[in-house]
Image (cartoon, helix red, strand yellow):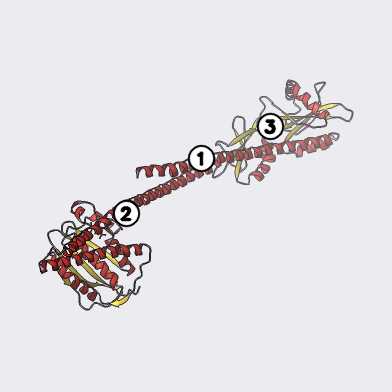
Amino acid sequence: MKKIGITLILIIILPVAFLIFNEIGKLNETEKVLEETYNNQLQAILFSVNQYSDDIVNSWANRIVELKADKNLLQEYVYDNLALEAVLFFDYSKNKILNAVGKKESNYSDETFINKILLVINENKNTIERLVEYQKAGYRKLEPLKFKDEHKFSLVLFSNTESDGSTELVCLIINPEAFAKRILLPRIQQITQNKFLIVVRDNENKFIVSSDNREFAGSVEFEKPMWLIPNYKIGIVLVGETIRDLIRSRATNNLILIAILLLVLLFAVVFVYRAVKKEVELAQLKADFVSNVSHELRTPLALISMFAETLELERVKNDDKKKEYYSIISQEANRLGRIVNSILNFAKMEAGKRKFTFEPKNINQVVDNIYQTYSYHLQNKGFKFEKDLSDNLPEVSIDSEAISEAVINLIDNAVKYSDDKKEVILKTGRINDAIYIEVSDKGIGIAPNEQKKIFEKFYRVSSGLIHNVKGTGIGLSLVKQIVEAHNGKIDLKSNPGEGSSFRIFIPIDSNS
Ligand code: ADP
């Protein structure tokens, strides 16, 4: 059995555990991929916000180039633009300012301010040259410039080719806060749709604006610098259940599921183990059964042949003795017949081939018949054999032969398993909707833990006194099968050392 247990563990638990852990690994991988995909999406959203800013400023640039010729129109355009403070046109090669248009409040015409801008342009020569190259290739590129110490403004440069072929540099002075609040906000509100939060903060983490218009001070999932406003960053925050929460709850669910699965598996293994154990025990019992049967058959056969031989050789002169020998031969032949019959019946029953013929009968009659047949035999063996039959029992539909067989089996056991106190009592009665036949003895009794098992086929109690008593272990299982075929049940009350009492119940309305 140990071997079977280990084999079960090896062939069921191990591969399944391996599969489960493999599956967990795969799940984790899937979750990772999922998280990555999701993160990519979040980053794509931030990218699209940047792209949007770029498109907006690009459209400004186009418009400015269109309106450039008419200073008034340009002035009007800048005034109407919510986030544009001023536009400066530079002669890049000469490093001087050509033209400037702006809102009055902005200090775009202030000399120190302009000098500062010129300084920044000079510091970023390479970038400017790149802009010019792009422009020559027909592509207008916007380039933000870092404007030191100036947080109120941010600079975006692009280059423009004049009709005479000269290249000028255009610098947009943007109010970053207004840009974020007036231009970006409607757009990010449209993107987020309350599913997440987009937050704009400056490089010192000062809150500027967020898609839900509320101040936000927590940490964000991702944050990217704004392309055109180098001082600003845009971050994205998940609202409600985050992907991590989802993954965590999924992992917990998976773990619970796996635990349940393992538990079920464990139960299955225990179940299989017990079933196999039962089969193994049954195989052992069957082996015992064969040897028990041989023994059971051999004893009466030996007696019959011995007495028959003695009689045949006419060694017995005394008539009484002869009579006694004949009676022994007949008794043993009966016993042999009973054993063979019960084995045959048992085999029939096992194969489901036993047929019952039910007829309404008074069980007192059946029990009385048995009593009459067996009283001489039992009294001969020194038993006090009594009957106590209840009056007025209704007829019940039974196969009287089978019921007799069951009762005889019980009487047989009562005789076999009685010790000093030889007493067998047959009783009938009625409880509610059932009549009963009881066979009780004052014999060795049955231990509580054996009381259920003795009804199993081939099972014999293998301790103490019983060891010496012959039997095949099929008697009680036969009784049980017969009773069940009558829709009845069998009850046992027994105390070791005090005796046993078996009660066969047959339902009164039974017409099976
Ligand atoms: P067998 O008597 O051939 O061994 P049974 O199926 O009739 O097989 O009985 C199973 C076991 O139940 C017996 O081996 C015996 O240990 C126990 N048993 C049955 N009847 C009695 C009884 N009246 N008193 C004590 N033990 C009993």
> Viewer-proximal residue, 436 or 404?
404
**Is 250 placed above or below 459 here?**
above
- Determine whether 284 is above or below 304 in the image: above
Closer to the camera in the image, 14 or 471 = 471
Q: Is residue 379 visible?
A: no
Residue under circle 2? 286
Q: Which residues are magenta?
A: 91-102
- Location of residue 373 in the rendering, given as x and y in whole percent from the top left corner: 19, 72
Identify the image quadrant of residue 42: top right
Q: Name the outermost residue toward the front.
A: 313
Placement of the C terminus among the 4 image quadrants:
bottom left
Q: Where residue 229 is drawn, which disc sits there?
A: 3
What is the crowding at mark 2: few (fewer than 14 residues within 10 Å), some, or many (at least 20)? some
Residue 363, compared with residue 439, is above or below; it is below
- Amino acid type at mark 2: Lys
Q: Can residue 15 be seen in the rendering of this structure? A: yes
Residue 86 falls in image quadrant:
top right
Name which of mark 3 and mark 2 comes first in the sequence: 3
Q: Is mark 1 within 8 Å of ligand 1?
A: no
| Circle nearer the viewer, 3 or 2 | 2
Instruction: Report if residue 96 lies within the magenta region.
Output: yes
User: What is the x, y in percent for residue 492?
Assistant: 24, 62
- Quarter holding the N terminus is top left
